Amino acid sequence: MTQTIHTFSKRVTRRQALDYLLHVPPDYSRRERYPLILFLHGSDERGSDVTIVKRHGLAKIVERDSDFPCITVSPQCPEHQDWLMQADALLLLLDEVTRRLAVDVARVYLTGLSMGGYGAWYLGSEHSERFAAVVPVCGGFNPMLGYPERAAGLRYTPVWAFHGAQDRWVAVSETRALVRALRQAGGHPKLTIYPNAGHDVWTRTYNNPALYRWLFKQRR
């Protein structure tokens, strides 16, 4: 008996949900438009208590500095998930916040640390049209997704990557490979390697005023 041809078609709907921390500048007014930073935390902050996202990185900075002059969105990744698995939810979250608040869509930025650095590389590469700049901190790539070559998706987007040369959790070679691939594709990423630092380079990075001066100059 020969094989017969069939077509399978079924409509599937899926609910997307993420808890997140939201910071709005104290001078917020609907008459203006504000830059927005999407911050992706590391693996230790996954779970169902969104307040733990404040432990590190940009969410910690904003908690300490209520005058931070930018809308910040800091979602929490569910337990046993990663940011690649939450990519659709992150884009929908960005759409929702942009709809509700006075966001300057030409100044939407993406950053993340460790697991969030992986997420920043991935989400930025796959959806570069959404972001004016991307700042991956001690992140890397998943070779199963075709990286680092797919980082070429960021060739027209300003990127500033950070890593510690002594990192034992995520090898600095991963960031170097992504930056190299991006440069070979015609991009011009900035790269900062802290020679004596291990995995925690986020404290120094997010406390550096030069990062924000550079970031807020970038427009899509």
Image (spheres, helix red, strand yellow):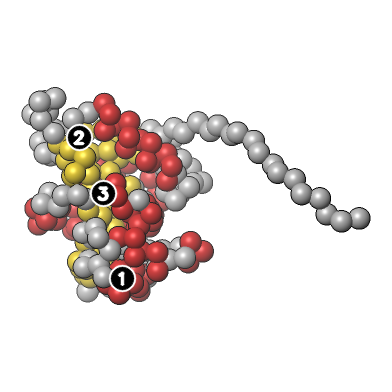
Question: Is disc 2 placed on a helix, strand or loop?
Answer: strand
Left/right placement of residue 113 relative to residue 61 reads right
Q: Residue furthest right?
A: 1
**Residue at mark 3 to residue at mark 2: CA–CA distance:** 13 Å
**Point 44% across, 51% down: residue:** 84
Q: Nearer the viewer, residue 187 or 202?
A: 187
Q: Position of residue 81 (x, y in %)?
A: 49, 46
Q: Are marks 2 and 1 in contact (CB under 8 Å)?
A: no
Relative to residue 197, is residue 38 depicted above or below?
Answer: above
Q: Position of residue 100 (x, y in %)?
A: 26, 26
Question: Comparing marks 2 and 1, which lies closer to the viewer?
Answer: 1
Instruction: Using the rendered image of the protein, determine whether residue 63 is visible from the camera's viewpoint.
Output: no
The tag on residue 185 is: 1
> Which label's residue is closer to the chain start, 2 or 1?
2
> Which label's residue is closer to the chain start, 3 or 2?
2
Relative to residue 85, is residue 157 depicted above or below?
Answer: below
> Which label's residue is closer to the chain start, 3 or 1?
3
Q: Are marks 3 and 2 in contact (CB under 8 Å)?
A: no
**Residue at mark 3 to residue at mark 1: CA–CA distance:** 18 Å
Instruction: Report the residue marked by disc 2.
Output: 103
Give the residue type at disc 3. Phe
Q: Are marks 3 and 1 in contact (CB under 8 Å)?
A: no
Q: Could you classify mark 3 by the number of other residues whose Cα lies within 10 Å: few (under 14), some (14-19), or many (20 or more)? A: many
Q: Could you classify mark 2 by the number of other residues whose Cα lies within 10 Å: few (under 14), some (14-19), or many (20 or more)? A: some
Instruction: Report the residue marked by disc 3.
Output: 131
Q: Position of residue 126 (x, y in %)?
A: 38, 54
Relative to residue 151, is residue 119 depicted above or below?
Answer: above
**Point 43% across, 66% down: residue:** 147
Q: Quadrant of residue 46?
A: top left
